[in-house]
Amino acid sequence: MNLKRLFLWLTFFSIAMGFLETAVVVYLRAIYYPHGFDFPLVNMNNSIAITELGREAATIIMLVGIGILSGKNPTQRFALFLYSFAIWDIFYYVFLKLLLNWPESLFTWDILFLIPLPWVGPVICPCIISLSMILLSSTLVYFNDKSPAIKVKSKEWILFITGSVVVILSFTIDCYKFIRSYELPPSPVLGEGPGVRSTALTAVSHFIPHHFDWWIFWLGEGLILTAIFVFFLRAKSVISGAK
């Protein structure tokens, strides 16, 4: 299968997955947020919460699987996983807007992921990351198809991974700080009061995001874009030297 056809079918697959993800969220919001989604998060019963965590893990496994099945070598498999993930994530928001007229804007807060603790941030942030993933995956596949010997070098991996960790930190740091500092209110039954730490689940159910560390996000995004640029220059020079 040529690359154009491969990317076309991966796009269709990822858009379909995006719709399935949206459908699940539509059902969950109808049950738990009948008046519209907002923070703090509503407590789910244990079985639903476990199911939701399992669904998120299963989604990642499916996207990894389609990348493995579609790619010819490790570089392509990684790149096609990133591409599928990015298209899925973008169209998840497209379908939410079409079906629920949500988000109100690209700066509306959303819950992005739940493992190992909630990732939260403005909707525009995962969209920016997804566009970067499309750029990265397209660059990797293009040059790897020209020459299978072109692979990501260690210094580029370090930039990619460090940038990704920093971006994740921007999504999780405020929730983590809240969980660490949250204290249970006084309880006449349990005798608890200020100074008593709560469970993470209890704290999350009271967490309302107000501040996003944009500088951390842009630092991570900058590292990712730098990695793409470094790889592009190196790969281009290899191709030019081979002619």
Image (cartoon, rainbow, N blue to C red):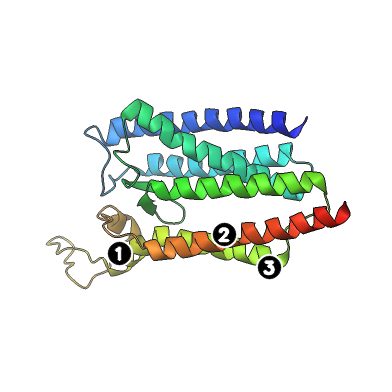
Which kind of residue does numbered mark 1 sit on? Phe
| Real-space Cα separation, disc 2 to disc 1, in angstroms | 28 Å
Residue 57 in the image, given as x and y percentages of width and height:
53, 45
Q: Is residue 72 above or below residue 4?
A: below
State which quadrant residue 101 falls in: top left
- Estimate how packed mark 3 is, as few (under 14), some (14 to 19) or many (20 or more) residues with alpha carbons within 10 Å: few
* Residue matched to label 1: 178
* Residue matched to label 3: 155
Tell me if residue 113 can be seen: no
Q: Earlier in the sequence, mark 3 or mark 2?
A: 3
Identify the residue shown where x is 42% and y is 36%.
93
Cβ–Cβ under 8 Å for marks 2 and 1: no
**Quarter of the image with the N terminus in it:** top right
Cβ–Cβ under 8 Å for marks 3 and 2: no
- Estimate how packed mark 2 is, as few (under 14), some (14 to 19) or many (20 or more) residues with alpha carbons within 10 Å: many
Q: Which mark is residue 224?
A: 2
Q: Nearer the viewer, residue 198 or 98?
A: 98
Residue 85 in the image, given as x and y percentages of width and height:
56, 42
Q: Secondary structure at mark 3?
A: helix
Q: Secondary structure at mark 1?
A: helix
